[in-house]
Structures are given as C-alpha cells and as structure tokens.
Amino acid sequence: MSHSPSLPDRPRLELDPEMSDAERLEAIRQHFRRIVQVNEELEDRLADAEGRRGELKDDVEQLKRENEVLKTSSLYIASVEEITDDGVVIKQHGNNQEVLTQAASRLDEDLRPGDRVAINDSFAVQQVLDDETDSRAQAMEVTESPDVEYADIGGIDDQIREVREAVEDPLENPEQFEKVGVEPPSGVLLHGPPGTGKTMLAKAVANESNATFIKMAGSELVRKFIGEGARLVRDLFELAAEREPAVIFIDEIDAVAAKRTDSKTSGDAEVQRTMMQLLSEMDGFDDRGEIRIMAATNRFDMLDEAILRPGRFDRLIEVPEPGAEGRERILEIHTQEMNVADGVDLGAVARDLDGYSGADIASLATEAGMFAIRDGRTDVRQADFEQARDKLQDADTEDERVINYQY
Ligand SMILES: Nc1ncnc2c1ncn2[C@@H]1O[C@H](COP(=O)(O)OP(=O)(O)OP(=O)(O)O)[C@@H](O)[C@H]1O
C-alpha cells in the first residue's frame, strides 16, 4: 500500500511586539500569501485524490460486474472457431456443438480463433481462459524421481512400512500378489494434521519404487468452469497410464470429496461431478497395471463415505503428530547437514516441542541456524534452539493461528 505524502506545514503567523505597524501589516500579508499557496497545493492534492478515487470506483464496478457474472451463471468451456462479422463461432467442449454467438463487449478485441473461453447458459462468451496446457501444468506436478527417501522421514516408521506394503510391493512384485491371490489395496489415504509428512511419504514411495510421481491438489480440481475438474481427473489418469509405473497423489482430497451438503449451487454440483469422475476412474481401474493411487487430507471427518468404499480409498493410514521420540528423530534429520556444537542435547530440545509438527521442526532448525549466523558464529548451540523455539512460539501467539483440523 502506498503512503500518502505528508501534508504541507501549516503556516504560522509570528508577530513581534516590537514590530512597527507597517512591519506587522507586511508580516500579515506574507502570512496570507502563504495560506493561499498552501490552500492551492491542498486543492491540487484533493483533485488528484478524487481522480484516483474515480478510477478505483470504476475498477470496483468492473470487478463487481465480473463477479456477478461468475456468481449468477454456470460457465462452460468452449473454443473459438472463427470470428465473423455476425459474431463469434464457438465449439462447446463436451458435445462439440458449434454455435454462432456474441462476446461480451469488453472482450471483442481480444478474441482469436483457437482461444479457450468460458461461455454462459446462453452461449455468450464471458471470459478468455488460459491455455489448456497452462491450466493442466498449474494443476499437476509431475516428477520423474522425487528426491525424498524413507530415511528423510522421521517418527513415522509404522506408516512407512504400511505405505511400502500397500504401494511399493504391488508395484515391484505384482506376480507375488497374483500368486497368493490377493488384490492389493486400491487407494491409500493418508490422513492427519498438517505438516506431518504425508506428501513426503507419497514422494518417497514413488522414488523408492522408481515410479513417476504425479501430484494434483484437490483445490485445483475445484474449478469455476463446468466440466473442467472432471476433465482434469481424466487427464490425470491418462497421464499416469502414459508414464507408468506411476504414483498418483491427490493432496487435499477433501476439496473434491467432502460430504454432500444440502445446498444446490452450481459450484457444489460441479464439485460433485468432479468427485464422480474420480470415483468412476477408480472403479474402472481393474486393470490398473503399474499405477498406484494415494491421497491425503487434514479433514478426515469431512470426507464423503463414498470414497472410502472397497475398491476406492480402502487403505487408511493415519499420520499423527510426532511424539517426543519422533520429534527427536525429525530434529536429527533436519540438523544433519548443520554444524551443531558438541554437547547439544537434541533429545532435550525435542522434549520441549510438544505439539510441533515435522514442518514446524524443520523451520525451528533453520531458525536456530539463523540465530547462530546473526551471532557471528559457525556452530549452532543449545541456546540457539531455545531462542528459535521462543521466536516461533511468539509468532504463533501473535498470529493467533488456529490450525483447523478435527479428529
Ligand atoms: N515426519 C517428518 N520427517 C521429517 N521432516 C518432516 C516430517 N514431516 C514434515 N516434515 C517437514 O515438513 C515439510 C512439509 O511436510 P509435508 O508436506 O510432507 O507435510 P504434509 O503432511 O503433507 O502437510 P499438509 O497436510 O500441510 O500438506 C517437509 O518438506 C519436511 O521438511
């Protein structure tokens, strides 16, 4: 935010009792001139500010109109085929129907054949969208071999073991499952508080099974446009099939798979459609080949039961907040590369970190290092860890950050 420049000083009239009448008169005249000057300056400033206010008001009006359009109508995706004198020819995605329509006047100049656009119920073009590949790239993160190993994850050895059984073993020894005659779990759902290592676990299992890691954030699947979320889900599974062996990881799955609410807004219906697509991809996935599906949530309580049925996310693994021993292990991992002074008792530091997640401990280690640097030292001492803890605790209280998860 820009600060307004300071106001001009208020002119002061200083009259000396020793002054003659003529001198007084001159002083008063000068004072008056200064007042007129200041007044002019203030009027200029006021005019500027009013001009700026007018501009901002126009911006607000424009945004309000756009917001109304987005709120009141469902938008569908289409592509621009041709721009003619009679209007714009668009082709709807999904049914490939071609329609001659009009674009909102503010878009007239911007439209080009090939553009992806959002249209409303009466086919009028409302918005030009990003390139399709852009929106996919935004939604999906693909890593050939993520650089996380099991050894980088502390305090959740049981969970690592369970994930290896459910994901790594079926990828590496599918024949064994066939011979024994058991189906490996369809999908693995990791649930637990934020920052406890769920994403790390999914990356590590992909890495250690030499599988491509394909991550999609649930929140990215909840798009404004009809059909886009479902389309991304289809793309996700197609991409995994092209890149197998692959691990699909859907983070924040609660964004698409929350319990049904009573509200019937088009947004909710769109989320439902996306979830249905996800379920149908999972159900139709008998011949799964070398693809494993994982998901994570901090809001297990909110999930729709439908996604937990057999054949879907049927292996639930809780990733809890670490206990004292786990915290010590995580602290060891995050200080491994640091020059920790002899005699520092990491166990004692960890005991004092009740309620800290793995992510909190990672920031604590960095913060402790920063204290050493600020002090001009190259080794990190016990006191640095203590100061780091105090700092993080203060920051927490100041923000009054409430971490919102329920069990
Ligand atoms: N168990 C752990 N061992 C070591 N480091 C951890 C652990 N848990 C978290 N971290 C640290 O915190 C960072 C964030 O962890 P991660 O993204 O895996 O958490 P998450 O459970 O997926 O969180 P969210 O639910 O917020 O997505 C990691 O990059 C790592 O530095």
Image (cartoon, rainbow, N blue to C red):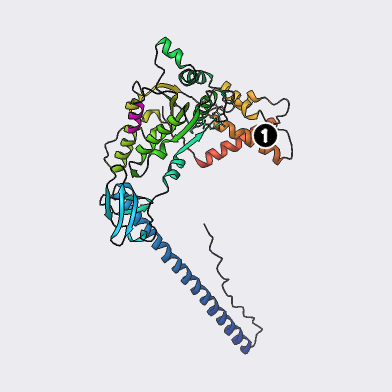
Q: How many marks?
A: 1
Q: Quadrant of residue 269 in the image?
A: top left
**Above or below: residue 125 compared with residue 351:** below
User: Is 203 situated left or right of 87 in this image?
Assistant: right
Q: Position of residue 44 (x, y in %)?
A: 50, 74
Is residue 281 part of the magenta span, yes or no?
yes
Closer to us: 3 or 116: 116
**Can I make out residue 297 in this image?**
no
Q: Residue under label 1, please give it.
A: 384
Q: Is residue 80 above or below residue 208?
A: below
Q: Residue at x 27, y 46 (%)?
A: 97
SS state under label 1: helix
Residue in the picture at 35% in, 37% down? 230
Query: For the stretch drawn in magenta, what is the main secondary structure?
Result: helix
In this view, which residue lies farthest toward the top?
180
| Residue 166 visible within the image | yes
**What percent of the width, then of the height, locates residue 28?**
58, 83
Is 78 left or right of 401, judged from the image as shown?
left
Q: Residue at x 27, y 39 (%)?
A: 263
Q: Quadrant of the C terminus?
A: top left
Locate residue 98, reporting x and y percent: 28, 49
Alpha-carbon neighbours of circle 1 within 10 Å: few (<14), some, or many (≥20)?
many
Amino acid at dot 1:
Asp
Give the residues drawn in magenta, as a range.
277-282
Identify the residue shown where x is 42% and y is 10%. Answer: 180
Residue 253 in the image: state x and y as whole percent: 40, 32
Residue 258 forms part of the magenta stretch: no
Residue 23 horizontal side relative to residue 80, left or right: right
